[in-house]
Each structure stands twice: as C-alpha cells, then as structure tokens.
Amino acid sequence: MLKGSIVAIVTPFKNGNVDETSLRNLVDWHITNGTHGIVPVGTTGESPTLDHNEHKSVVEIVIDQTNGRVPIVAGAGSNSTSEAINLLKHAESAGADAALVVTPYYNKPTQEGLYAHFKAINDASNGIPIIIYNIPPRSVVDMTIEVMAKLSNLDNIAGVKDATSDLSRVKKQKDLCGDDFLQFSGEDITAYEFMENGGNGCISVTANVLPKLCSKFQNFCLQGNFGEAKKIHDKIKPVHNALFIETSPAPVKYVLSKMGLIEEDIRLPLVNIQQNTRDILDKIIIDLDIS
C-alpha cells in the first residue's frame, strides 16, 4: 500500500534538456534517505513545460532507476481527457505502481464533468490505481466530497492527493469513501494535522530537500507517535513556508543546486528566484544544516 513520505520529485535540467544523470542520482539519494515513494512529472516536476516525449522519458527513467525499491506514482494528468488517458496508458505500460491525475485545469468543468473525466480515465485503465489530485488553487475547480465518494466506487480510483487546505475533509472523505480510500496531503505545511486526522501520507515538496526528516516524520505519524512527529514538523516548518515564497519548484531547485545535487535550471514561464528569497533560503540552509 502507498503510504508515508512520497516525494514529488523535481525534473533536473541542464542546458535546457532533462538531466538524466542527476535525475537517476536523485532517485538513489531519496531511496537511501528513506523516501517511501516517488512521484515523477507532477507539478513540482514541471509537467506543464515538458513535452510528451520528455514526460514519458522521465517516468521511464525514474521507474528504471528505482527498480522496484519503492512505489512510483506517475503524473498523468491533463485538462484534456484523451491526453490524460494517453499518459495513464504509458505509465501503466512503463511499470508505474499508480498514476496521479489532476482535476482538469483552465476548462472549469462542472462536477458532472469532473465525474465523467475521471470515469473515462478509470474505464481506460487496465488496473493501475488512480490517485485524484484535487488542487483548487492551481486548477480553479474543487471536486466535492460527494463526487469523490461516487468515484471511489469505481474499480481503479484508489485515493486522493488533497491540496484544498480543508483539514475537515480527511474524516468526511474517510466516512464517505471508506477506510481503503487512500488520502495524501498535498501541502507540507498541513501534513501534521492531515495525518492526525487519519491521512495515509504526504506527496511532498519539502521531501525534495529533507527526505530523511520527512520520512522520519511520516514514520512517527504512521506509528501514531504524534508527539515525536510534531517535534519534527515544528523544526522543518520554516522550510515548508520558504519553499513557497515564490512559485514552486523554483525555490526547491535553488536549494538542491546549493546542495550540489542539480543545476538551478528552470523552464519559462517560471524563472529563478530573486535575491531576497535566496537570502532567506540560505539562512534556513545554514540553520538546519541542509547539505
């Protein structure tokens, strides 16, 4: 079962191209440091600016390098249903353990449209579990709990990455969707309360730079040791906040570049972070001894 600290891994670039060597090294580094699972080509992986060949290549590289050591949840979302199905089928054929499918952005579908979109993707699956990614701040639409519950009855809809900031949903979704419906926090800053309310883990941005602490935090949560988990959460809270001073993943890539793990390259329309943000992150790097 998917659980714990699942990193929404960055896509490293070098000279404008996907940096395969750094990506493979990141995968090994995460597994060595206890990361429980990996999401390639999610939002943090800059999926909107990867072409389809790059998208599929990144998924294949991560699956190959992981070699079954941890589960892979491949990003497969789109605001086009047919495009999402194409990415889902590729993830499935490449050997991903699950697929992360975002609610369609820009189109602003109704709740009926959201249901029809995910049902079509469910029906196209040959068995790969589908995690719904509900993120109203980026997609503009918010799937209701009632629609989520209806989708949870379908064979291949396995859970949700919830980035709504509404912590009351964890229990409500559990009540309507059942205990087997997986719930992952999509926001590091609320991960403690999310887990305390019954979540299964976090698909994390912060785990990109603090994999060991994020894994340890999740292990404590999963064991029900929320006292120790809270200590870690409070310690790394400044990182959660600082990584979103500017649009992610620009701050994450800066920190990883300072750690010598990747180049800072990011694709337009995102740009490298401003100097004042660098100063804040530099202080956090020193204070937490991130290296």
Image (cartoon, helix red, strand yellow):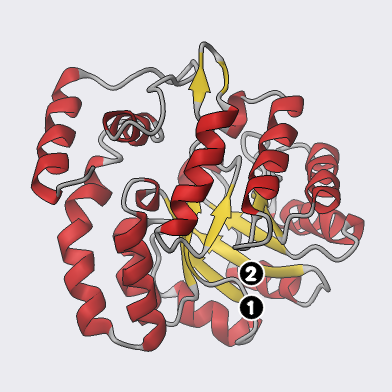
Quick one: label 2, few (<14), some, or many (20+) residues within 10 Å? many
> Which image quadrant: the C terminus?
top left
Can residue 11 be seen here? The reply is: no
- Mark 2–mark 1 Cα distance, whole angstroms, equals 5 Å
Q: Residue at horizontal 29%, vertical 86%?
A: 225
* Position in image of residue 10 (x %, y %): 49, 38
In the structure shown, which secondary structural element does the residue marked by tag 1 occupy?
loop
- The residue singled out by tag 1 in the image is 181
Whether residue 87 is situated above or below residue 163 in the rendered picture: above
How many labels, in total? 2
Amino acid type at circle 1 is Phe
Crowding at label 1, few (<14), some or many (≥20) Cα neighbours within 10 Å? many
Q: Left or right: 222 with respect to 41? A: left
Element type at marker 2?
A: strand
Q: Is residue 233 above or below residue 178?
A: above
Say what amino acid the circle numbered 2 marks.
Gly
Instruction: Please tell me which residue lies in front, 181 or 111.
Output: 181
- Residue in view at x 47 percent, y 73 percent: 169
Left/right placement of residue 128 relative to residue 255 reads right
The residue labelled by disc 2 is: 159
